[in-house]
Image (tube, rainbow, N blue to C red):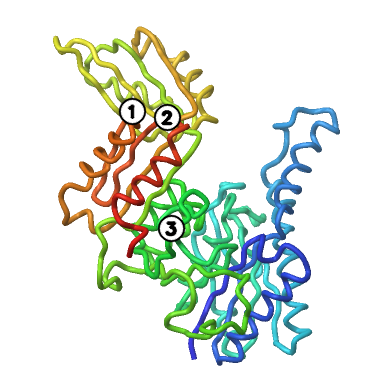
Amino acid sequence: MARIVMKFGGTSVADLDRICNVARHVKREVEAGHQVAVVVSAMAGKTNELVDWVRKMPLVAGASASFYDAREYDAIVASGEQVTSGLLAVALQSMGVDARSWQGWQIPVRTDNAHGAARIETIESATLLERLAMNQVAVVAGFQGIGPDNRIATLGRGGSDTSAVALAAAIGADRCDIYTDVDGVYTTDPRIEPAARRLARVSFEEMLEMASLGAKVLQVRSVEMAMVHNVRTFVRSSFDAPDAPGMDDFDNPPGTLICSEDEIVEQETVTGIAYAKDEAQISLRRLADRPGISAAIFGPMADTGINVDMIVQNISSDGQFTDMTFTVPTGDVDKALAALEANKDAIGYDTVQSETGLVKVSVIGIGMRSHAGVAATAFKALADKSINIRAITTSEIKISILIDGPYAELAVRTLHGVYGLDKR
C-alpha cells in the first residue's frame, strides 16, 4: 500500500462527465489498496469568470476597476475549487468510494498574508492522515489556504499544482500525480515540432528551467517545492482511459517522472528546447560607467514588480560610458519605461530604446555540465538558418537565446534537430 496525491486541473474537471472520469481514476488507485488524497482546480474557465466579476463589480458600483479588497477577491475566486471538490466527492460516493471534501481552511493549509499571491507556510496534516488511514479519500480544494488574519488566501494562478506538491510533502506521499490535458513532458512543443518525444524522466532542475522558460506543463513554484522536498512527481493525462493498460503500474505509469538527478541513469546532453514569446528588449545608451549604475537601473524595476531577464552590458573603448540592454515581458514595457523615466536623473542615461515581438529560445539539459561545445552547436545551427542572435544568457544546464519573433518556430525545430532530440 502506498500514499498518493492526485491533482486534476481545470480541463480535467471541466464538466460533470469529466468529473466522473476523474472519479474513476481515483477509484482505480483506491481499489489497488492505496491511500489517496486528491487536489482539484476549479472547472475550466470558472476562475477567469470569477476574477472578471470581481473586477467589474466596482465599475458597476461607480468606482474604479482597481477598487476592491484583496481579501474579498480571495473569498470569491476560491469558490471555484470548493464547488469542484464537493462535486468530485459526490461522484466518488456514488461509485461506492468513501470520500469527503476539504477546503484549505479545514485542513488547515496555513499561508502568509499576501492575498492573491500567498505562499504556503505549513500544512497541519494530522487529521487528514487519520482519515486516509481509515481508507477515506480526501478531496482537497487546491489554490487556497488560510492566512494569519483567519481569512481565505489564494496562491496565485496555477496554485493548485503547488497545493498538490505541498500536500504530498506534508503527508509523506510516495508519489504526486499531476493529471493534465497532456500525457507528459515533451522534448519541445509538439505543435511546433511534430517529432517531439515524450520524456520518461526529467530532473527537478531541468523541469524548473523548462517551467520558467516557457513550458506550461507545471507551475514554477510547484517544481521548486517538489525539488526542495524531493517529491517524486508524475505528469499524466486525465484523458487516458482509467482502465487502459499500464495505468495501474505504480512504479512506471504512463507519463513523465520528475525526480532527482540521481534517479536518471543515462543523462542526455540536451533534454529539451523551451521557448517564451512576447519578450521585449530595452536599451539604455551612453550611461556613465560607474559603481552603482546597475543598482540604479534595476532597483526601480524590482520596486515596480518587473521581472528582468537577460542583461547585456557593453563598455565603450575609452571606459567612460556603457550601454545596458535587458529584456522584460512585453506586458511590462510601459511600466519599465515609466520607471526609467522617473529615475532618469539618478541613472543618467542619454537615450532609451525599446523593441517588442521578440522570442527567447532555450536549450536545457543536465548533461551540459560535463559536455563542451553545446553552445557552439546552437550558434552555428542558427547561423546556418540566417537567424540573428540578439542576446545570450547561460547557466550550468541552460543556454537562452533572444531572437526576432518570426524566427521562433524555425529556431525551435532547428535546435531540436541539431541535438538529435527527434532520434532517440
Q: State which quarter of the image contains the C terminus.
A: bottom left
- Near mark 1 (Cα within 10 A), the count class, few <14, some 14-19 or many ≥20, is some
Residue 90, placed above or below residue 114: below
Q: Amino acid at mark 2?
A: Asp
**Label 3: element kind:** loop
Q: Are marks 2 and 3 in contact (CB under 8 Å)?
A: no
The picture places residue 271, in percent across and down from the top left corner, at 33, 58
The picture places residue 20, in percent across and down from the top left corner, at 73, 76
Residue 372, placed above or below residue 311: below
Q: Is residue 17 left or right of residue 299?
A: right
**Label 1: element kind:** loop
Which of the two residues, 214 or 245, is positioned nearer the viewer here?
245
Q: Are marks 2 and 1 in contact (CB under 8 Å)?
A: yes
| Disc number lying in front (2 or 3) | 3
Q: Amino acid at mark 1?
A: Arg
Q: What residue does disc 1 label?
A: 390
Q: Earlier in the sequence, mark 2 or mark 1?
A: 1
Give the Cα distance between marks 1 and 3: 26 Å
The picture places residue 199, in percent across and down from the top left corner, at 40, 66
Give the Cα distance between marks 2 and 1: 8 Å
Question: Which residue is at 49% across, 28% downward?
Answer: 357
- Near mark 3 (Cα within 10 A), the count class, few <14, some 14-19 or many ≥20, is many
| Disc number lying in front (1 or 3) | 3
Q: What residue does disc 3 label?
A: 196
Give the Cα distance between marks 2 and 3: 23 Å
Residue 270, placed above or below residue 104: above
**Label 2: element kind:** strand
Q: Earlier in the sequence, mark 1 or mark 3?
A: 3
Q: Are marks 1 and 3 in contact (CB under 8 Å)?
A: no
Which of the two residues, 152 or 56, is positioned nearer the viewer here?
56
